Image (cartoon, rainbow, N blue to C red):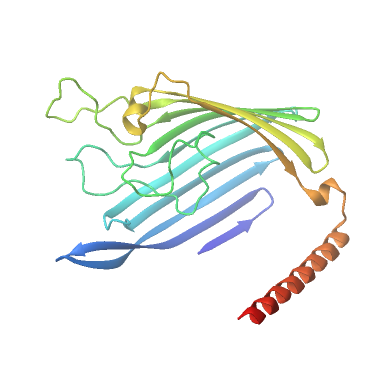
Amino acid sequence: MWAHKEWEKLSASILFLNNGIEQHYMKDSIQNSRTNFSQTAGAQINYTHKKNSLEGFGYYQLGKTAQNERLSAYNASINAKYTFHEKWNITLGGEVLSGTSQNANSSNINRSFGAYYGTSHKFNGFMDYFNRTANNNHTGLIDGYFKTGYIIKKFKIGLDHHFFYTAAPIQSNTIPQVPDFVAANPFLGYEMDLTVKYNFTKGVVIQAGYSQLFGTNTMHRIKGGETNSINNWAYVSLYVQPFKAFNIKKKRRRLMMIKISRSMCVLQNAITSAVLRLI
């Protein structure tokens, strides 16, 4: 269930999701199956004044995980955007996804938040280092970020900074090993994302980006890999919106879509007739 309401400067939405995941398991040497249900409930609020904005959301999960574990997790975020002289803007914010401690004596409850059916690339840096989509006993994530944007003529430049921490304690790699739980430094690393957009013409945009992540030993314990190696990526992409690029008016767009739809129906009927002849 989702509900949304807009006012002059304020908008708000609420969400309730009952999510079922089928689990296959063995009992008495016989394979069985069951559906484990989890519930997610929360709200999001956006306040906008001129070109400045304040946004926040919070969600709570309970029920059972896909592995039939008891679930109690949350996801919360807040950020503020301020625009200077219509060209400069800064965004300061943070997000917390709760996690499950690696201390075996802490609790038997899964506290790892899973963002079902969400888009991961939009959040927590463009390197996509963190999986938000499952309650897989991850140690959670705290993402403090600072973003800047600048517009000059046809260019739009963005530079994002992310500082990552674990939300729950993880086991330190102590040498020699000790019987008691020793928590590692929660700092995972720093990520920098640079994007440049160029409005080539109406409806045609060229975008390029570069990202680099500087991980710590704690990141190495969670993700593996080598902290001393260079960890980056770059891309160039072309976005084309034909209706805007060729300045096609709304009325002509509708006529074109009707013609395309009719052509698809004719093609589908022709394919169906051909298949029936072969049967």
In the image: residue 45, left or right of residue 185:
right
Q: Is there any visible trace of residue 192 in the rendered image?
A: no
Rendered position, 35 above or below 230: below
Comparing 49 with 265, the one in front is: 265
x%, y% of residue 70?
A: 27, 55
Q: Is there any visible trace of residue 35 in the rendered image?
A: yes
In the image: residue 180, left or right of residue 228:
left
Rendered position, 271 above or below 133: below
- Which quadrant of the figure has residue 54? top right
x%, y% of residue 37?
A: 35, 63
- Which quadrant of the figure has residue 251? bottom right
x%, y% of residue 192?
A: 54, 25
- Looking at the image, which residue sits at the far front? 278
Comparing 232 with 57, the one in front is: 232
Q: Please name the residue shown 79% across and 65% down the image.
A: 260
- Looking at the image, which residue sits at the far left? 179
How many marks on residues? 0
Q: Please name the residue shown 79% across and 64% down the image.
A: 257
In the image: residue 79, left or right of residue 28:
right
Comparing 42 with 191, the one in front is: 191
x%, y% of residue 14?
A: 51, 57
Q: Please name the residue shown 28% across and 56% down the image.
A: 67
In what quadrant of the picture does the C terminus appear? bottom right
Q: Please name the residue shown 32% across and 57% down the image.
A: 66
